[in-house]
Image (cartoon, rainbow, N blue to C red):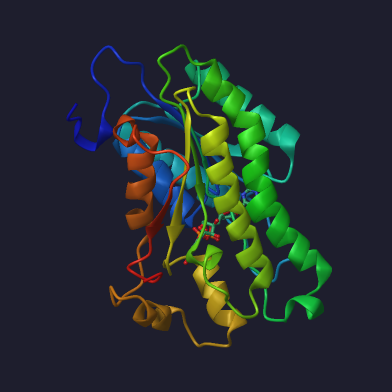
Amino acid sequence: MARPHGRMNSGEHRRVALVTGAARGIGAATVLELADRGWSVLAVDIASDDPALPYPMGSKSELVAVATEASSRVSRVGAVRPFVADVRDPEALRAAVAEAVDTWGGLDAAIAVAGVIAGGDPLWEMPIERERAVMDVCLGGVMNLARAAIPALLARPEPRTGRFLAVASAAATKGLPLLSAYCAAKAGVTGLIRALGAELGGTGVSANAVSPGSTDTEVLAETARIYHLPDAVRFGGQQPIGRLLAPAEIASVLAFLAGPDSSAMTGAVVPVDGGLAL
Ligand SMILES: NC(=O)c1ccc[n+]([C@@H]2O[C@H](COP(=O)([O-])OP(=O)(O)OC[C@H]3O[C@@H](n4cnc5c(N)ncnc54)[C@H](O)[C@@H]3O)[C@@H](O)[C@H]2O)c1
């Protein structure tokens, strides 16, 4: 059963993943990690800014650069493709799933990484369009991906090893002031994953999540701005590990969960947080 880094045995098909939020941060690191492990990947991102949010999203050029770098690592041209879609748009995600299935013959893992943060006001004073952006991307986007992708995971022949994965947050279990919508959305993701784990029982397809701690990305930089801190480095001191996490450290756990070696897990929410939740 030992398969280094969950690599495929010869004779198994090359595994296919769809990753949202892929232009930068944890999503980009996940695309690169999966490519290193031999996967074909559709790298999905909105790749444009959201007028409801005061900080920039990933760009089209960042998304294309991630796909190009990942394709070069897997040494097959086109093994990782960029795809622009807003996770709030169920039709766009259906098109993304269809693109992956048409290109590579099926889907083995759908990984919902896309997320946004907004806050700075108590909930009752937060502009409603920011609350909606957080809920609709962080929770609605995960549900939309589940709706679009799980039928493709179930369409693989038995015995299946499909994986639906989501990125929650330490904010799912901590009450963070001025980030109430974000906490609510991330707690929603953990509830969703537990329910999907139960619903998918017996199918061979599993649902799991990771809950990252403070990770060095734009979401954390925006969190520092929300709390009027000069930079995000000090968040590292709140974690027993004593530093910020790197996106690649979250990606390696997601890649493990995506692979065959996570076969005993479903409905799990795995803290990858340097001990923040202790
Ligand atoms: N950085 C942290 O400390 C931390 C901690 C816990 C959880 N998270 C979660 O990790 C995930 C990845 O965030 P990150 O930290 O890498 O930040 P990031 O801002 O660098 O990456 C988020 C990516 O999602 C994309 N995106 C945003 N809205 C989208 C939409 N509607 N449709 C498609 N793509 C969209 C952005 O363009 C961006 O490329 C998020 O779900 C975030 O909530 C981050």
Is 12 left, or right, of 27 in this rendering? left
Of 208 and 54, nearer the camera is: 208
> Where residue 170 sits in the image (x, y, percent)?
48, 65
**Residue 269 % position (x, y):** 45, 51
Instruction: Tell me if residue 142 comes above or below residue 108 in the rendering.
Output: below
Residue 52 visible from this viewpoint: no
Above or below, 64 against 48 in this view is: above
On screen, residue 47 versus residue 193, left or right, reads right
Is 67 on the left-hand or right-hand side of 98?
left
Tally the marks.
Answer: 0
Residue situated in front as seen by the camera: 260 or 5: 260
- The one nearer the camera, 59 or 239, is 239
Residue 153: x and y, percent?
Answer: 52, 24
Q: Quadrant of ligand 1?
A: bottom right
Q: Residue at x 61, y 66 (%)?
A: 183
- Asked if one can make out residue 3 in the rendered structure from this viewpoint, the answer is yes
Residue 92, placed above or below residue 127? above
Looking at the image, which residue is at 54% across and 63% down? 172
Residue visible at 74% across and 41% down?
89
* Quarter of the rendering containing residue 36: top left
Residue 215 % position (x, y): 42, 66
Q: Residue at x 52, y 66 (%)?
A: 173
Q: Nearer the viewer, residue 145 or 23?
A: 145
Instruction: Tell me the quadrant of the picture where the N terminus can be found.
Output: top left
The part of the image, by quadrant, that contains residue 278 is bottom left
